[in-house]
Amino acid sequence: MINKIKELEKLSRLLDPKESIREQWNAEVLEYSNTFINNLDTSKAFIQSKENGKAIYNLDIEEQAVELTSLLDSTTKNIDGVGINPASGGHMGYIPGGGLYPSALGDYMAAISNRYAGVFYAAPGAVRLENMIIKWMCRLMGYPTTAFGNLTSGGSIANLMALVTAREAYNLKARDFEKSVIYLTKQAHHSILKAIRISGLSEAQLRYIPLDNNLKLSAEHLETAIIEDKEKGLIPFYINASFGTTNTGTIDPLEAIAEIAKKHKLWFHVDGAYGGFFKLVKKLDSKFKGITEADSITLDPHKTLFLPYGTGAVLIKDKENLLKAYHCLADYMQDTVGKEDEISPADISAEQTKHFRGMRMWLPLKLFGLKPFRAALEEKLNLTTYFYDEIQKLPGFEVGPEPELSVAIFRYVPKDGDANVFNRELIEAIQTDGRIFLSSTNINNVFWIRIAIVQFRTHLEQIDLLLDIIKKYIDDTSTELN
């Protein structure tokens, strides 16, 4: 038995490489990282490919080890070399993510130490750091000291957590679900519908509130619907409002919705996954009126704080509601009980074991300070306004509502032919060019092209390049038709 153990030990120690090997790997990964970043100015934002990285299948999991050099080479060709490049300043489709360099260092440190950040007893410093970040976000949103929250993998899980917390706060049981009513609009993010399904509320009544002319939730129609549902003996309990819809960046009338929610005693949730961190821009303060009255808020640091994907947050105005929804004890965790100076993330979320996400957020915020974040967000607002104004100067183009944040929609209306078909071909041409990536949407059966300026590397030169690409396509198309 001893010989067998020693034999296995010799092999298992390969999992703990010596310093010389670590230094070699570090050097190769650092070279890969620097090459990737240094080439971003000349790299495409979108690369179409027939193979779409199929060669990665040649590196399936096997018994034998493979040299890092070949793995990095395959990564460059089969992962970085196809599809959307989220790190590119030309990525203006969907809601782009970020990828700040210090966040990668934070993830590296968190993975090396592998702190178990789920329970205070196990990693008190890590839990304090994450709780400190949560408290900062609560203060940023104007929440009271009773508020708390959780770092999630993104807005989808944050929206789910908010809905489950509301369900438990209102003591809804399965017998109540058919009579429960959730209020939202057709512009609500589809993760809300996923959350309804996952939380067991599929049988609840969904009330889609009409939009006004600016694609905002109509507060008047909302209150009318609530009153009518109460008269029918239903249980109105949840309002979902958006601070920056994905389609158009529209902000719902939070102040009016907050008054209605308070009057009729409904849970008021604000999905600010995209727009929430624009709170850092002082000139937008008026647009945030009413958000302090929300019972819950979703934020996505991997959007407008430019962090890597996998960084979301949910804030709950009353932390007791979080504990009621998620706190649970286990016999094997008895050593941790009574030794907490702080709320443990595991006590207020569905996760027990969790990645130490806080380091990827804390490190860049401290290394850069808030000033460049504020500047970058205001720059994106101004770039969006600039594009919105410039595209209207081109004959044949029309635009959607004036952008409130950094998303705008536009389309070309040809003198002859189907406008939807033309704009579908225009977006395909932009994507085929690849230097800029935009996406599209459909609103009331009208095909619109979206521009979402969120990537921290997007600057004036990328916007001007996009305008040039569009102008050239229109000119070439007009020449062909003539």
Image: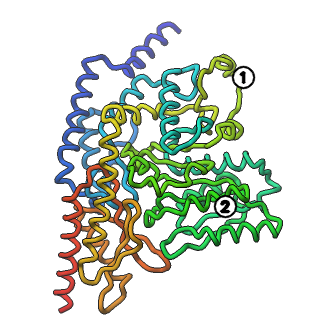
**Closer to us: mark 2 or mark 1?**
2
Residue 408 circle label? none
Q: Is residue 64 visible?
A: no
Q: Residues within 10 Å of mark 1 (few under 14, many from 20)?
A: few
Left or right: 155 as drawn, with respect to 109: right
Q: Which residue is mark 1?
A: 331
Identify which residue, 370 or 61, lies in the foreground.
Answer: 370
On screen, residue 329 above or below 271: above
Identify which residue, 419 or 65, lies in the foreground.
Answer: 419
Location of the C terminus by quadrant is bottom left
Q: Amino acid at mark 2?
A: Ile
Q: Position of residue 387 (x, y in %)?
A: 28, 67
**Image quadrant where residue 265 sits:** bottom right
Q: Position of residue 481 (x, y in %)?
A: 21, 90
Left or right: 293 as drawn, with respect to 51: right
Q: Position of residue 168 (x, y in %)?
A: 73, 46
Residue occupying image coordinates x 53% and y 33% = 354
Q: Which residue is mark 2?
A: 260
In the structure shown, which secondary structural element does the residue marked by tag 1 occupy? helix
Q: Amino acid at mark 1?
A: Asp
Instruction: Mark 2 or mark 1: name the one nearer the start of the chain.
Output: 2
Identify which residue, 114 or 150, lies in the foreground.
Answer: 150
Left or right: 104 as drawn, with respect to 475: right
On screen, residue 80 above or below 203: above
Label 2 to label 1, Cα distance in Å? 44 Å
